[in-house]
Image (cartoon, grey):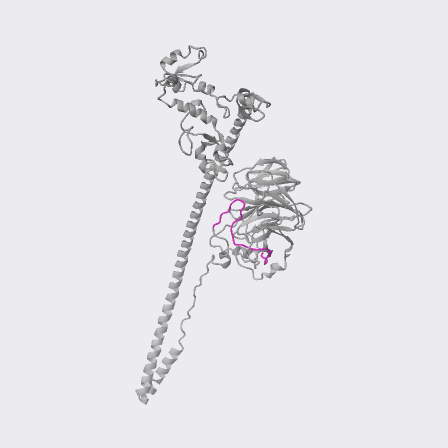
Amino acid sequence: MSLQELIREDFLTCKICYDLYTVPKILPCLHSYCQHCLEPVVRDGSLQCPECRLKTGVPGGASSLKTNFFINSLLELFQIKHNRDLACTVCSDAQKIVTATARCLDCKDFLCQSCNQGHCCSRLTLHHRVVKLEEFLAGGYDAEMRLLQELCCQDHQQEALRFFCDTCSTPICRDCRMLDHFQHKVVSMANAVQRERPSVEQLIQSLEGTVTCISEQEKAVEETIDKLKTSGENIKERITKYVDDLISYVLAQKEAVLGELSAFLTQQMEGCRLVKEELQSQREKAVSTKEFSQRVLSVGKDYEILHLEGMIRNRIQELQTYIPRKLERQIPELTIAWDQPEMQSEAALFSLVFPGEQPEGDTETVFEPASEVSASPSEESEVELNSPLDSEEDSCPSSEESALGTPAKDPSYCNRHRKRPKRVCTFEVDQSCSQEKPNITGIAVLPHTGGILLLDQENDEIKQYGADGHLEQSIPLPDSDGVFTGISLCGDILACSSDSFLFFLTLEGKFLHKLLLRGSESSYAITSYEDSYVAVSEGTLCSISLYSPSGACVGRVEPRDYRGGKFLFIAVNAWEEFIVSDFIKKQIVIIERSGLILNVLKTSHSLLTKPFSVCVDSASNIFVVDQLKVIKFSPDGETGEVVLSNQSRLKRPRVLAVDDSGRLVLVQEDGYVHIYCF
């Protein structure tokens, strides 16, 4: 930036009073203000910068702050150049007012034409440089003026600051050097500046990287804002379209059922009308016969009665032998597929899941062994709006009955063919050494020992517990601008995911290296296959990347023709098959490493409603956290049963894992950990 650009009114104007600086004081944040402007904002020995809000301690008031001599020097030039009524300095001393036409750069006097002609005639001023006033005011000599400007000592007003005391780290004048700083290490001001300039320049250059980094972060924030807007609009559009389609579907169902009802009622009413008319006719015949017969008996002569007796008898017998047409009483009844009590108790139709959260649903408590449920989900069946979801937890439907949503007749059958889980240990995540309430987002188990590793996102640490629930140690996570969410153990290496990065640590928490993950997800779930690689679930990419403990990408699993979902939690079994929960499609996908999809467990014909965390045991059985319950599926996903369920609906399960001994470790959102044996 040139000197002329600095000698501008906007640069030399106080941002509080909007006038030229008066006794400018500079704050540690490098913002400057007038001393009298800062005095009102001093509170209890400190003040807050009006621009950046940085707090500064000023026990001595605003006057104790450093004066900005840089601004003062520029103000001097600015005020000289903007004073258009400049008089000759020499003539003014002689009580004369004569307009100046020149300026002496050395003695800083304004000179009229006469004084200008004689200014360089003495030995003292012989080599002074006198310039035209127009050129001086135009800024042609600003650089020379800056070089000739001197700052005088505050203790010795007539002496310029030409030395620098290294001992006191302060500029001094000649008198200061001979008096107060005589025994100190003193260098010339020029040498001190020459010595310090490279380090200051290096500091300024280092700001380029900071500015670039901040600009990139700002760009990332802008991209996030754009993504938020786009995602928000997409969600609004999807919800609106879904609701419109649902309304259209419901209205179509309404018209169809009402039409069917109307046709049925018309048919039945017509049948009833014909029967009613026939009955009315028969009743009229019977009444007429009765009245005629009574009249004959009342007023008829004996001969007449005997003559008509046979006809009356025959007519009455004919009427009495009449059999009315049988009326089929078909009274319609209404059943509503979506009016089941268990469906009304489920979570809202729409729900949003944010990073580090589980879909909202009903609350629940400590988990107990559930009423047994078994099902055989269909592999490729699609969700239909008119298919009721059978979520009864006291039934055990067969494969065919499960597809129809019909409970089995003998729910006790399952009870006789499976083991009930037994809770062997319960403990609360330790908070004694934590600054914040723990928030467990990841879990891993140590092989052979049964130890449990819990990733505490809120306190940026890994809590290690023994198999009996005793806290053994807390492992601090490496410094990161992101938020840690996932944890996995690959051999003797710890892998942790934080935003878009995968960190590798030792079991003691020592940082080894990190790598950037694919995609733009805010969090990534991870798992490990033995000590070979770490598998990363890649969200909306619907793919899985495999990384060796050294950080190299050793493979990628991309399910064939699978789109529109969002991979969430992930597990891998002994056969190197990947089990992934899809948050958007609300299903479990079982995938080979080649990308072949082996099975899809959907909510339409299985026990699933909103699958969340997943894990596998040594026999490759699949365990799924699904809202209020934990479901166990066979390795191929063909059969499933609810093994744990809530009773009083107060707390919700979050993450789970199975150790080498087959013990199921379940972490609830309230911070309690339960261990079950089967």
Quadrant location of the C terminus in the rendered image:
bottom right
The span picked out in magenta is 350-373
Q: Residue at x 36, y 75 (%)?
A: 282
Q: Residue furthest front?
A: 95
Q: 136 and 623: which one is in front?
A: 136
Q: 346 and 375: which one is in front?
A: 346
| Quadrant assignment, res 132 | top left
Q: Residue at x 51, y 52 (%)?
A: 361
Residue 352 location, x and y as percent?
Answer: 49, 47
Q: Residue at x 53, y 38 (%)?
A: 519
Q: In the image, 509: left or right of 175?
A: right
Q: 161 and 318: which one is in front?
A: 161
Q: In the image, 171: left or right of 317?
A: right
Quadrant location of the N terminus in the rendered image:
top left
Q: Name the dominant secondary structure of the magenta segment.
A: loop
Q: In the image, 254: left or right of 504?
A: left
Q: Residue furthest right?
A: 448
Asked whether 165 falls inside the magenta stretch, the response is: no
Vertical side of 203 occupied by 516: above or below = below
| Quadrant assignment, res 461 | top right
State whether residue 451 appears in this view.
yes
Vertical side of 217 occupied by 134: above or below = above
| Quadrant assignment, res 325 | bottom left
State whether residue 50 appears in this view.
no
Residue 641 location, x and y as percent?
Answer: 59, 54
Q: Residue at x 56, y 26 (%)?
A: 169
Asked whether 354 falls inside the magenta stretch, the response is: yes
Q: Residue furthest bottom?
A: 302
Residue 118 location, x and y as percent?
Answer: 39, 11
